[in-house]
Image (tube, rainbow, N blue to C red):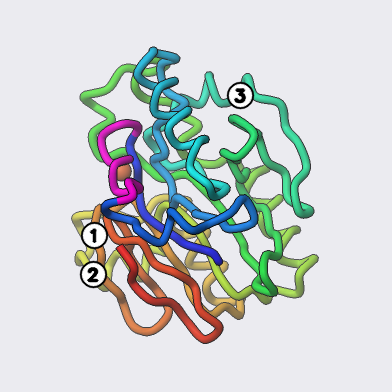
């Protein structure tokens, strides 16, 4: 089984994965996956609390996959080695907590995924560079080009897209022009959305559980389970 949820924000929102809120989780195995759509937040300050919650998550019976959002400590994340997993470049945070790097694709349970983390912090004026904000929250041109090459290699066809922010057109459809002005990443996703054949696209970042048409799904506190034809809400 494959489940998807929104931002966990370190210990702020991780409790959505408790057995009480996510009873399905109790019966899962390491071959079942829970994907966090960015703002994972448990590679942040190396504090005892952070290690407590990472262990808590590691000890859940499933395997956790996550993409980065904007609220990650990118200096700390850089210190983890890059590895291969199901044909994708990843970083093992622990044995069963795996960061999927930007522009990677993999197949699980017959479904193909394309993942691309990152987003722009709305509150960056209130944050300090290298302490609570990192320029790497937005991708480099090389990362974006890598994503295009990956999509080329899979014939611009996937089942599921996992990102932290959405194409500009989806932001604008939900929020209008001004609340989330399009940045280079949103424009990049607009470009991808035009060419890519996909079934479902999930994004965190907006702290919203809502769908925009059949394909685009804002996800935050809810947990969804992928089915053969779509998904269902389970938490
Ligand atoms: Fe967030």
Relative height, residue 233 to residue 124 (above, below): below
Residue 140 location, quadrant: top right
Q: Is residue 16 magenta?
A: yes
The spot of residue 100 in percent (x, y) is: 61, 45
| CA gap, disc 2 and disc 3 | 34 Å
Q: What is the distance, in whole Å, between disc 2 and disc 1 at their CAs?
A: 11 Å
Above or below, 87 relative to 56: below
Characterize the local packing of mark 3: few (<14), some (14-19) or many (20 or more) Cα atoms within 10 angstroms: few
Q: For the point 41% across and 61% down, which residue is it?
A: 24
Disc number lying in front (2 or 3) = 3
Residue 219 falls left or right of residue 123: right
The answer to which of marks 2 and 1 sits earlier in the sequence is 2
Q: Earlier in the sequence, mark 2 or mark 3?
A: 3
Q: Which mark is residue 174?
A: 2
Q: Which residues are magenta?
A: 10-19
Disc sitting over residue 208 in the figure:
1
Question: Which residue is located at x 20 percent, y 64 percent?
Answer: 175
Q: Nearer the viewer, mark 2 or mark 1?
A: 1
Residue 68 falls within the magenta-colored stretch: no
Checking the image for residue 126, the label placed there is none
Magenta stretch: helix, strand or loop mostly: loop
Residue at image mark 3: 78
What element does badge 3 sit on?
A: helix
The residue depicted at 55 percent of the width and 66 percent of the height is 1
SS category of the residue bearing label 1: loop
* As drawn, 218 above or below 137: below
Per the model, the C-alpha gap separating discs 1 and 3 is 29 Å
Question: Contact, CB < 8 Å: mark 2 with mark 1?
Answer: yes
Residue closest to the eye, 92 or 68:
92
For ligand 1, give the image quadrant: top left
């Amino acid at each position: 089984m494959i489940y998807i949820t929104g931002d966990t924000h370190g210990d702020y929102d991780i409790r959505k994965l408790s057995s009480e809120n996510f009873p399905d989780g109790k019966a899962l195995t390491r071959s079942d996956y829970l994907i966090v759509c960015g703002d994972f937040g448990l590679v942040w300050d190396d504090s005892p609390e952070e290690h407590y919650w990472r262990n808590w998550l590691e000890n859940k019976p499933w395997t956790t996959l996550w993409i980065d959002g904007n609220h990650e400590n990118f200096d700390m994340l850089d210190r983890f080695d890059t590895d291969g997993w199901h044909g994708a470049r990843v970083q093992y945070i622990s044995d069963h907590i795996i960061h999927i790097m930007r522009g990677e694709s993999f197949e699980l349970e017959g479904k193909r995924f394309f993942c691309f983390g990152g987003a722009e912090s709305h509150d960056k004026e209130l944050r300090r560079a290298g302490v609570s904000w990192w320029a790497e929250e937005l991708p480099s041109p090389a990362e974006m080009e890598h994503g295009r090459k990956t999509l080329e290699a899979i014939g611009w066809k996937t089942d599921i897209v996992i990102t932290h922010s959405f194409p500009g057109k989806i932001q604008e459809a939900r929020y209008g022009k001004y609340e989330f002005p399009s940045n280079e990443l949103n424009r990049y996703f607009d470009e991808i959305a035009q060419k890519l054949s996909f079934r479902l696209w999930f994004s965190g970042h907006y702290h919203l559980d809502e769908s925009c048409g059949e394909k685009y799904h804002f996800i935050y506190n809810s947990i969804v389970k992928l089915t053969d034809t779509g998904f269902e809400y389970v938490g």
